[in-house]
Image (spheres, rainbow, N blue to C red):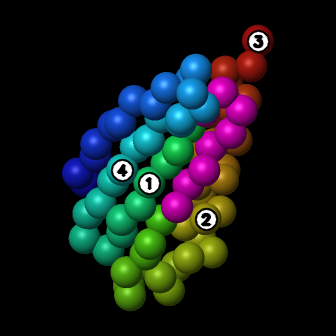
Amino acid sequence: MQVSFIQGNNLEGVPDTVEFHRAGVRGSLLVDAKQFVLRAELGFFLGSFKEQVEAQIIQNLDNRLAQARP
């Protein structure tokens, strides 16, 4: 997977951005102090598994965020 990181500017309200792509998927993740915004375009094959991909992403984020809580 090819990944690039673009640092935002918190003072100007510009989120950090992670852009990613590989065969079958391309997208971005915008991150600021209050939210994540994930946009992913799935190719034909992965598109047929959209619900499972979305559920796995949500589960992984929930698990990671729960671990980070004090």
Name the residue at 62% across, 43% down.
Answer: 36
Q: Is residue 11 above or below residue 35?
A: above
The span from disc 2 to disc 3 (Cα, nearest Å) is: 27 Å
Kind of element beneath mark 3: loop
Horizontal and vertical percent position of residue 37: 60, 50
Q: Is residue 45 above or below residue 38?
A: below
Q: Is residue 20 above or below residue 46?
A: above
The span from disc 1 to disc 3 (Cα, nearest Å) is: 28 Å
Q: Earlier in the sequence, mark 3 or mark 4?
A: 4
Q: Which residues are magenta?
A: 32-39
The span from disc 1 to disc 4 (Cα, nearest Å) is: 4 Å
Q: Would you identify the image quadrant in which residue 33 lies?
A: top right
> Contact (CB < 8 A) between labels 1 and 4?
yes
Count residues near mark 1 (Cα–Cα under 10 Å), then give few for <14, some for 14-19, many for 20+.
some
Name the residue at 74% across, 19% down.
Answer: 69
Mark 2 or mark 1, which is nearer to you? 1
Q: Amino acid at mark 1?
A: Ser
Q: Amino acid at mark 2?
A: Glu
Number of marks drawn: 4
Q: Amino acid at mark 3?
A: Pro
The span from disc 3 to disc 4 (Cα, nearest Å) is: 29 Å
> Would you name the residue on which mark 2 appears?
54
Q: Earlier in the sequence, mark 1 or mark 4?
A: 4
Q: Amino acid at mark 4?
A: Glu
Q: Earlier in the sequence, mark 1 or mark 3?
A: 1
> Would you name the residue on which mark 3 appears?
70
> Would you name the residue on which mark 4 appears?
19
Which residue lies most toward the right here? 70
